[in-house]
């Protein structure tokens, strides 16, 4: 029985970068493909507004002006307009950036966290492994793992909450997937998705109308995931663990087979844009 839910959830996209399609699908990909930077707004009664990631913001261009960060911009050129940053899209809905209480960080790649500086009243929630890596890596090494420290607010360390310290419950489900309940609610759970990046998180959200498993960058495309086509192996250079990446996809598949009412959405997938535009 699905419990009554009054949490609301909406997905948005703030900017995109372009990459070669054959990185996503080495068998059939041709030309360039767009990776939209999707993020989510949650509203939890008695708690307030929470973001899950932020997409791109203009901070990305500032943070990648000099080397080694400039390489990041070369690898993934970004298109963004002033009126589709997370801050601007929220304002268009009547929500001011300083009303955001928490930003949950799926992982520290620029396309997920470039807007952090816009949310000055927020505390940041992330997985311990992701945070440890951010503290540990610097310079070229950090950039090679997709981490741009210049995107982090100055007082970041004093505003971070490590997920396993604030979770109400941590459960490994029957598919071997770790779920974190927090905020005293069970219809929204954070999900541990290792492989693409250290300590990467996604979420599950379920109410009487819909059920979503938002699996961030566990794949870049629902189609390749569903057909078992893995990205070009060159991505191993910046992935945290290829084995974990493959294993995480297998676990998501096992979950999906047994829970067909769930929509599986990935951050950069065309299917997710259709979902945002109410086409699926
Ligand atoms: Zn990404």
Image: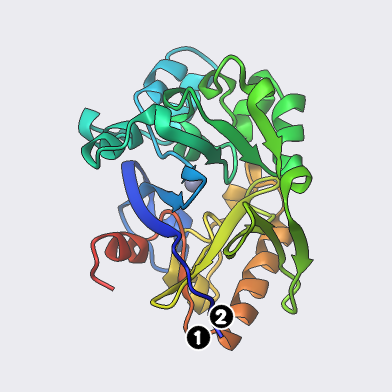
- Choose between 125 and 20: the one closer to the eye: 125
Whether residue 213 sits left or right of residue 241 in the image: it is left
* Residue 24 visible, this orientation: yes
Whether residue 243 sits left or right of residue 106 in the image: it is right
Query: Which of the 4 quarters of the picture holds residue 58?
Result: top left
Whether residue 142 sits left or right of residue 120 in the image: it is right
* Residue 52 visible, this orientation: no
Q: Where, quadrant-wise, is the C terminus in this rendering? A: bottom left
* CA neighbours of label 1 inside 10 A, class few (<14), some (14 to 19), many (20+): few
The picture places residue 144, in percent across and down from the top left corner, at 62, 31
Q: Which residue is mark 1?
A: 260
- Choose between 65 and 97: the one closer to the eye: 97
Q: Please say if 172 is above or below 244.
A: below
The residue at 54%/18% (across/down) is 150
Q: Please say if 120 is above or below 272.
A: above
The picture places residue 238, in percent across and down from the top left corner, at 62, 42
Q: Which mark, residue 217?
A: none
Q: How many marks?
A: 2
Q: Which mark, residue 256?
A: 2
The residue at 43%/78% (across/down) is 208
* CA neighbours of label 2 inside 10 A, class few (<14), some (14 to 19), many (20+): some
User: Distance of mark 2 from mark 1, alpha carbons?
Assistant: 6 Å
- Choose between 213 and 61: the one closer to the eye: 213
SS of the residue under disc 1: loop
Query: Which of the 4 quarters of the picture holds residue 233?
Result: bottom right
The picture places residue 237, in percent across and down from the top left corner, at 64, 43
The picture places residue 44, in percent across and down from the top left corner, at 48, 52
CB under 8 Å between discs 2 and 1: yes
């Amino acid at each position: 029985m699905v419990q009554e839910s009054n949490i609301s959830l909406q997905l948005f996209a703030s900017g995109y970068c372009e990459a070669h399609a054959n990185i996503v699908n080495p068998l059939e990909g041709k030309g360039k493909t767009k990776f939209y930077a999707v993020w989510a707004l949650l509203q939890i009664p008695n708690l307030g507004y929470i973001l899950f990631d932020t997409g791109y913001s203009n901070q990305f261009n500032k943070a990648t002006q000099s080397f080694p960060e400039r390489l990041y911009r070369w690898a993934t050129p970004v298109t963004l307009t002033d009126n589709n940053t997370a801050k601007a899209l929220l304002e268009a809905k009547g929500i001011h950036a300083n009303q955001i209480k928490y930003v949950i960080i799926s992982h520290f790649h620029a396309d997920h966290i470039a807007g952090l500086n816009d949310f000055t009243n927020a505390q940041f929630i992330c997985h311990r492994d992701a945070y440890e890596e951010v503290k540990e890596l610097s310079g070229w090494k950090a950039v090679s793992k997709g981490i741009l420290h210049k995107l982090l607010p100055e007082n970041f360390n004093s505003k971070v909450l490590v997920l396993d310290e604030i979770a109400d419950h941590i459960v490994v489900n029957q598919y071997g997937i770790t779920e974190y309940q927090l905020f005293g609610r069970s219809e929204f759970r954070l999900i541990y998705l290792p492989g693409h990046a250290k300590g990467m998180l996604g979420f599950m959200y379920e109410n009487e109308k819909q059920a979503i498993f938002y699996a961030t960058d566990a794949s870049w495309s629902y189609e390749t995931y569903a057909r078992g086509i893995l990205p070009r192996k060159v991505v191993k250079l910046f992935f945290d663990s290829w084995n974990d990446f493959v294993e995480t996809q297998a676990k998501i598949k096992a979950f999906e087979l047994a829970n067909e009412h769930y929509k599986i959405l990935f951050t950069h997938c065309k299917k997710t844009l259709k979902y945002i535009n109410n086409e699926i």
